[in-house]
Image (cartoon, coloured by chain):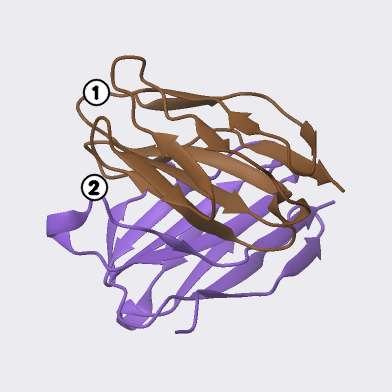
Amino acid sequence: GNSVTQMEGPVTLSEEAFLTINCTYTATGYPSLFWYVQYPGEGLQLLLKATKADDKGSNKGFEATYRKETTSFHLEKGSVQVSDSAVYFCALKGSNYKLTFGKGTLLTVNP
Amino acid sequence: EAGVAQSPRYKIIEKRQSVAFWCNPISGHATLYWYQQILGQGPKLLIQFQNNGVVDDSQLPKDRFSAERLKGVDSTLKIQPAKLEDSAVYLCASSLGNFGSLREETQYFGPGTRLLVL
């Protein structure tokens, strides 16, 4: 079946540091890939997505590239802010159109 | 545009009691989802509706969980009787439900209902 593996947190960074959260997946066919973010006390929000190999999703300074050869979709941001503190979920949608989530990575950014 | 609404936001009950959660999706969204998110894990799909019909309930514990979506709009998820392991956040999500773009379609999530079973 489909599965998503994210790097375990928590991740703690200082403001303006570089962020990478690793995500790899297992799926048959050609899934769509997503990053969702969950701010404290709020629901999940779509951060970015990519629907085919080599696509790059980007939003709010975050980027992730769909790498089929390594089955990866790593999230990156060049300079994090305190307001980026949240839980980040990698997810895929496969041929059954169901979202499968990773366990989430808690990011804390200190001023 | 109003988002997905859920109530209540928090609920504390004792085991063997019953509880119900309510969800109002984004207007015009045909597809509605209920997820269970246990602490430290990603959301797990419990049930998916397309309008007022069930598309997928393969991971719904049907001996104690039930859900309905009357008139294809609002939805209610019920647990009866509750167990300790049901303590979790219950998320409702909705999407347009266009069959031509299901693979890429964005799901919009509500704030969730946090359930604690004592």
At a point 51% along the width and 52% down the height, the residue shown is B35
Q: Of the numbered discs in the image, which one, if any, rests on residue B43? A: none
Q: Is any atom of residue B44 visible in this view? A: no
Q: Chain of mark 1?
A: A
Residue A54 shown left or right of residue B1 in the figure: left
Quadrant position of residue B52: bottom left
Residue A100 place in picture, x, y as percent: 42, 37
Residue B46 place in picture, x, y as percent: 46, 49
Quadrant position of residue A25: top left
At a point 40% along the width and 53% down the height, the residue shown is B47
Q: List the single residue furthest toward the left.
A: B100
Judging by colour alone, the chain drawn in purple in this rendered image is B
Q: Chain of mark 2?
A: B
Q: Which residue is mark 1?
A: A28
Residue neighbourhood size for the residue with mark 1, other residues' Cα within 10 Å, grouped as few (<14), some (14–19), many (≥20)? few
Judging by colour alone, the chain drawn in brown in this rendered image is A
Residue A71 shown left or right of residue A11 in the figure: left
Q: Is any atom of residue B47 visible in this view? A: yes
Q: Amino acid at mark 2?
A: Arg
Residue A86 place in picture, x, y as percent: 70, 49
At a point 73% along the width and 50% down the height, the residue shown is A81
Q: Are marks 2 and 1 on the same chain?
A: no
Q: Amino acid at mark 1?
A: Thr
